[in-house]
Amino acid sequence: MSDDELRAELAKITTELYHAGLITATGGNISVRSASQPDAAWITPSQIFKGDLKPEQMILIDMEGKKISGDDKPSVESVYHAGIMKYRPEINAVVHTHAPLSTIFGMCNMEVLPVNTEAIFTMNMPVIPFYLGGTKELAKAVIDCVGQTGAFLSNHGLMTIGKSLRQAADNSYMVEHVVDILLKIKMAGLTPNQVPEKTVKFLLQFAGAF
């Protein structure tokens, strides 16, 4: 994809996640590595309605999270978006949402049980303690602790990563779906059957996450 195509995809997926209820009007941020500058990334602007962003509103940042170009301010979370891409060259996109069920899950010290195959790829996601959004402390914690799929941000939301913007966004949907199942099991007071341990290990090895 060209940079123009990436900016268009960034606007489209941000709007998609807003209508799915995972991103709020001004809460959440998404980034994707630049096609022409591997040491730069496009990110959504700060404090602008997320339900109708246009490609030309996206901000170009460097690998320290500082603005290179764009009319508005980059997301306050730009430092950890850039930092993940800087230290994880295989990662090309970061999606931070305020997904409601994942937010609940991340603040309740619950365990991800291997109740289905999607849950297996969510099991190793860390829960990062609460730090105020946009702070250096949050950025450092995310960069240091992010797993293969992403991380729960305690009392804040969800962060997922991917080799592409589509994959990172799909990981957000996957985690929210898994958490929905786990919370319903908890509320019903049920003890679920789990995927056999042998299968869990195989799938994690297959995914390169074990």
Image (cartoon, grey):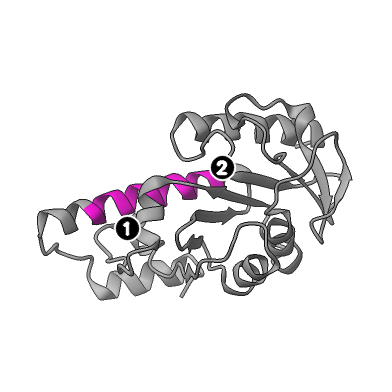
Amino acid type, label 2: Gly
Residue 68 percent coordinates (x, y): 89, 47
Is residue 107 one of those drawn in magenta? no
Q: Earlier in the sequence, mark 2 or mark 1?
A: 2
> How many residues crowd mark 2 within 10 Å: few (<14), some (14–19), many (20+)?
many
Task: Please provide the residue range marked out in magenta.
Answer: 167-183
Residue 81 percent coordinates (x, y): 69, 56
The residue under label 1 is: 117
Taking the spot 32% from the left edge, 54% from the top edge, the residue there is: 179
Name the one closer to the observer, 153 or 121: 153
Amino acid type, label 1: Thr
Q: Disc 2 vs disc 1: which is toward the camera?
A: 2
Name the one closer to the observer, 115 or 191: 191
The residue under label 2 is: 27
SS for tag 1? helix
- Tell me: 32 left or right of 189: right
